[in-house]
Image (cartoon, rainbow, N blue to C red):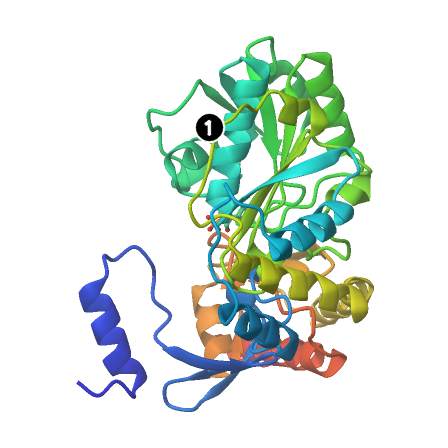
Amino acid sequence: MVLNTNSDILAVDRGLQPALYNKREIALVRGNGVTLWDAEGKSYLDAMSNYGVNVLGHAHPAVTEAITQQAGTLISCHQSFANDVRARFLEILLALAPENLTRAFLCNSGAEAIEAGLKFARVATGRPNMVAARGAYHGRTAAASEVTGGKHSKQSGGGGAVTHVPYNNLDALDGAVDDQTAAIIIEPIQGEGGINVPDDGYLLAADQIAQRNGALLILDEVQTTLRTGVAFAAAHDGVQPDILCTAKGLANGVPIGAALVSDAVAAELGGGIYGSTFGGNPLACAAGLATLQTIEAEGLLPSSVELGEQLRSGIEGLNHPSIRAVRGRGLMTGVEFRTRVTPILRGLQERGVLALPAGSLVIRFLPPLIIQPTDVELMVETLGETLATGS
Ligand SMILES: Cc1ncc(COP(=O)(O)O)c(C=O)c1O
């Protein structure tokens, strides 16, 4: 079969993969900057960065150059050997993190970083249980899905009991943590749960609850990393978690993840506790290094604050009765509707803008940090047109 139409490619994809994903009816075959193209040459403004991954957009020259150079030098290097590129990446990554986090376990995805964080907390405290938030999303491997709330949650062997409490509710959190709690795990902003931004001070107070009970605080920054106007959202509250899990945007699309830990946690982690064959490979580290250096050199974190405000105030300015709330921080924005968002997402896609759902009532915009004010105007205008025509 010649694979040059969206429907031909989708037919093969659907025929050869288990039906785990709701497919979006187009096949994406190329990207450049903030533009993606489907198999039939139609272009789209990328307002989703592949679920928050492509912070520098597509085919960014600095990342392409770093990957190309590293591919011709050394792609993999098991972590039982040191590597120059990995060492440089680790230095930059940890310099961006809360200052109490001094070491990083490198892996390949968000869920792996969460698995590591949960395991490290259980080993470091010698306690079995976790307290997590309702509406949380931490990934779909066995242990990560135990702490995930709602429909993605699955009980699965794993460690101890998991108690879910309402997000942004300190009394409930306080009541749930006890002397068997290894850690509280929370997202600084809930992503999949609907871009839920907690009150200022929530993360700091959660840390104090953990400390009072001899438990740890794990921040899941897999989605918030590089998205909220700062490298890690922990900085908004000035909180110093014991463990911080990160992934997604770190290497602009090359798979990578990390669990950053404090000295005290690291001291409890002996040889063989965890490992990963691919984790910390030089190819991903080279991409990560180029990504972090470019973001710093081009001032993309401060500019993302203004672009996010432009987007949210533009959407509020549409004054559309179907919009219930607009919320977010930096370039992490959720628009909550009174009705299901699938038709609106389809309408945006037909008009050339790719956005994401976050649950059934929220549209999520996670554009690359390199978008321009004119792209933001286009996103707002296209949403306005889509809502004006009913889908
Ligand atoms: C907050 C959060 N944690 C963990 C994960 C899991 O990451 P991955 O899909 O890379 O395993 C995600 C993915 O969306 C996420 O948003």
The image position of residue 365, as x and y in percent, is 60, 64
- Front residue of 295/217: it is 295
Is residue 84 visible from the viewing direction of this image?
yes
**From the viewer's perspective, is residue 128 above or below residue 381?**
above
Q: Which residue is rendered at x = 44% and y = 42% of the image? A: 276
Q: Is residue 271 left or right of residue 263?
A: left
Q: Residue furthest top?
A: 179
Q: Which residue is rendered at x = 58% and y = 71% of the image? A: 47
- Which amino acid lies under the numbered mark 1 shown in the image of this protein? Gly
Q: Which residue is rendered at x = 38% and y = 70% of the image? A: 24
**From the viewer's perspective, is residue 124 above or below residue 108?**
above
The image position of residue 10, as x and y in percent, is 27, 75
The image quadrant that residue 61 belongs to is bottom right
The image quadrant that residue 248 belongs to is bottom right
Residue that mark 1 sits on: 272
Q: Secondary structure at mark 1?
A: loop
